[in-house]
Image: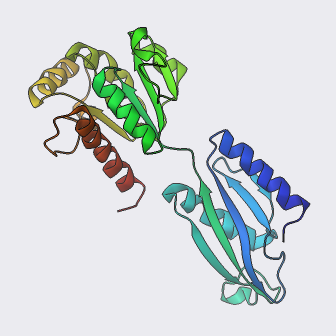
């Protein structure tokens, strides 16, 4: 049973989800005997350390906060069991009871940032949207970024790469898909993108095209270690031919890399 404080926690959770703020909801789901708060008590733990509500305070709450850091990192829920009897044996309290606490992560959708709004770019945006990702697309051709051309893009950023990045922050929870129309566009965009913490950067084109682009980037002073971050040619080899198959190949690689990074393997 929830009280007024817990209803406020749920309202704060709703605001956090709407604002795409990573947060863990800690809920007491079962209790026995004497415990600080009963089943239904809730607390929020934000990535920046802010808290909302309480599940009882003290060492118990401190341990739940610490466990929440791992939940934020892995994006996986946890069910915690605590006995509040003997601190000398490591228990986080002396109330005399037992309780279970469920830690549930609420994370913003992973962003797929598509550079290049051609036919492949649209296919990637469409599939990424269907998969539940946040979709962002940029191109220096505004006519390619209309509602009709890119109906499934959550954000459309016309202009240069520098302008697009000024309008949208690339975080570690972003995968960048370069499907541009030329080596020159790749070479223009990549030095800026390599300075971001993006989890994945992939570049479309043949192996020969990538050799040309990487040589130009090296000549421009991009360090070899930076170039090692790039997946090129982009995608999982499935002998794709159609636009839709190419999009499947690209998103399959995005999924493989992001799932490996969050510990889902």
> In the image, residue 111 lies at what x, y percent?
47, 38
> In the image, residue 5 lies at what x, y percent?
88, 59
State whether residue 241 is above or below residue 109. above
Q: Residue at x 28, y 15 (%)?
A: 185
Q: Which residue is drawn at 52% across and 29% down?
A: 154
> In the image, residue 176 lies at what x, y percent?
37, 33
State whether residue 187 is above or below residue 122. above
Location of the N terminus by quadrant is bottom right
Q: Residue at x 28, y 42 (%)?
A: 248
Q: Which residue is drawn at 24% across and 17% down?
A: 181
Q: As drawn, is 56 to the left or to the right of 243?
A: right
Instruction: Identify the image quadrant of residue 4.
Output: bottom right
Location of the C terminus by quadrant is bottom left
**As drawn, which residue projects farthest toward the left?**
208
Q: As drawn, is 240 to the left or to the right of 161?
A: left
Instruction: Identify the image quadrant of residue 101.
Output: bottom right
Q: Which of 66 and 205 is in front in this view?
A: 205
**As drawn, which residue projects farthest toward the front?**
148
**As drawn, which residue projects farthest toward the right?**
4
- Colouring: rainbow
Q: As drawn, is 44 to the left or to the right of 209?
A: right
Q: Can residue 174 be seen in this view?
A: no
> In the image, residue 73 lies at what x, y percent?
51, 56
Q: Is residue 188 visible?
A: yes
State whether residue 251 is above or below residue 43. above
Q: Nearer the viewer, residue 246 or 100?
A: 246
């Amino acid at each position: 049973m929830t009280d007024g404080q817990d209803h406020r926690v749920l309202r704060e959770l709703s605001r956090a989800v709407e604002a795409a703020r990573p947060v863990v909801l800690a809920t007491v789901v079962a209790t026995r005997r004497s415990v600080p708060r009963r089943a239904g008590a809730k607390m929020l733990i934000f990535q920046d350390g802010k808290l909302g509500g309480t599940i009882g305070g003290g060492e118990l709450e401190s341990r739940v906060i610490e466990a929440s850091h791992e939940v934020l990192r892995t994006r996986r829920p946890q069910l915690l069991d605590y006995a509040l009897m003997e601190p000398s044996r490591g228990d986080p309290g002396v109330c005399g009871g037992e309780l279970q606490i469920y830690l549930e992560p609420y994370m913003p959708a992973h962003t797929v940032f598509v550079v290049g709004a051609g036919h492949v770019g649209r296919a990637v945006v469409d599939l990424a949207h269907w998969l539940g990702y946040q979709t962002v697309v940029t191109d220096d051709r505004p006519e390619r970024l209309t509602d009709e051309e890119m109906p499934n893009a959550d954000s459309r950023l016309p202009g240069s790469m520098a302008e697009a990045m000024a309008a949208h922050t690339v975080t570690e929870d972003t995968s960048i898909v370069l499907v541009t129309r030329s080596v020159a566009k790749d070479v223009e965009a990549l030095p800026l993108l390599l300075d971001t913490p993006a989890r994945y950067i992939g570049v479309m084109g043949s192996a020969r095209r990538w050799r040309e682009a990487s040589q130009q980037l090296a000549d421009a002073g991009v360090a070899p270690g930076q170039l090692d971050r790039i997946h090129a040619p982009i995608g999982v080899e499935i002998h794709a031919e159609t636009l839709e198959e190419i999009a499947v190949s690209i998103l399959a690689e995005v999924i493989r890399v992001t799932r490996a990074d969050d510990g889902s393997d």
